[in-house]
Image (cartoon, grey):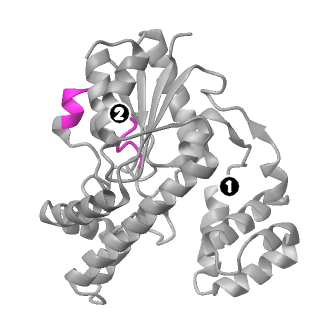
Amino acid sequence: MTIRAVLIAGPTASGKSALAMEIARRNGGVVVNADSMQVYRDLRTITARPSPAEEASVPHRLYGHVDGAINYSAMRYAADVVDVLAELAHEDVLPVLVGGTGLYFKALTDGFSAMPPVPEAVRAAFRARVEEVDTVALHAELAGLDPAMAERLRPSDRMRIMRALEVFLATGRSLASFQGERVPGPLAGAQLLKLFVSPPREVVRARIDARFEAMIASGALDEVAALRSRQLDPLLPVMRAHGVPGLIAHLDGALSLDEAIARGQADTRAYAKRQVTWFRHQMEGWQAVAPDEALEVALGALGIAR
């Protein structure tokens, strides 16, 4: 069978984006984003989005196409990918999907729960009401309305508690009832090359620390200052991108710049560790490859001479 798409994952700072670009360059393909933070146009530098020069050297899709005020989801991502895949299939072009968001890949290959959209008016009214309500109290409210979901969630998990409450208020149904309804993924059953780029842990940690400092030198603080000036809901995904909370705390006078950098580095290192754990336990059928072997493995599977 012909490989329909190449999927490249790995922890942050593993070199997967450079690999994806080289594969696309060798095959006349298109690099398609699978990173939940690189979708936001507000944050190019601090999310390590491909530079304008990189985007010009090889076609890229789904990078920086979402405004930070939008609560983008895996479901919306999958819908966007469906359109891209249809376009590329019509042009007989190979998509090379790359990123570190395991949930995005899982939505593409395994499908996802048929989650209902929450009207923006419902979400805005709810969040305005609970802005000053502590998380334990919100969990208690959820327990009164939707005990099944409350039992599943930690009383400290504010984001998931709020999501469960929003769904119940919008639909009158438990979030758990929707989680049992599955929508097939757009790549379900397709012949895929799935690679997980896996450098040694100490290499990833060193790259993360060096890259974060390079981001600051390249204007990440100004980028975050512009985001802060928009006064968006602090619970939006864009406001929780690695490095953003610490730099906002610095801009607010709560942290020194060195402390903010250290916090951003630590948060990103912890995230890289979670990425490895996720793919190890959640993503079957992926081939772990060392960075210096990944290109040869990919080209061989695609039948491309080096």
Residue 60 among magenta residues: yes
279 vs 172: above or below: above
Q: Which residue is mark 1?
A: 118
Q: Earlier in the sequence, mark 1 or mark 2?
A: 1
Picture disc at residue 284: none
**Residue at left offset 52%, top offset 51%:** 72
Q: Is residue 168 above or below residue 134?
A: above
The percent position of residue 91, horizontal first and vertical second, equals: 41, 10
> Residue 294: which numbered mark, if any?
2
123 part of magenta stretch:
no
Residue 184 or residue 83, whichever sits in front: 184
Q: Quadrant of the N terminus?
A: top right
Label 2 secondary element: helix
Residue with the most extreme bottom position: 254
Give 13 or 133, whichever is nearer the viewer.
13
Q: Amino acid at mark 2?
A: Ala
Q: Position of residue 107 (x, y in %)?
A: 61, 40
Between circles 1 and 2, the one closer to the viewer is 2
Q: Which residues are magenta?
A: 54-66
Res 20 quadrant in image:
top left
Placement of the C terminus among the 4 image quadrants:
top left
Q: Residues within 10 Å of mark 2 (few under 14, many from 20)?
A: many
Tag 1 near tag 2, CB within 8 Å: no
- x, y percent for residue 221: 21, 69
Image x and y of residue 147, in percent = 87, 72
Mark 1 residue crowding within 10 angstroms, few (<14) / some (14–19) / many (20+): some
Image-quadrant location for residue 196: top left
The residue located at (45%, 58%) in the rendering is 69
Q: CA distance from mark 1 to mark 2?
A: 41 Å
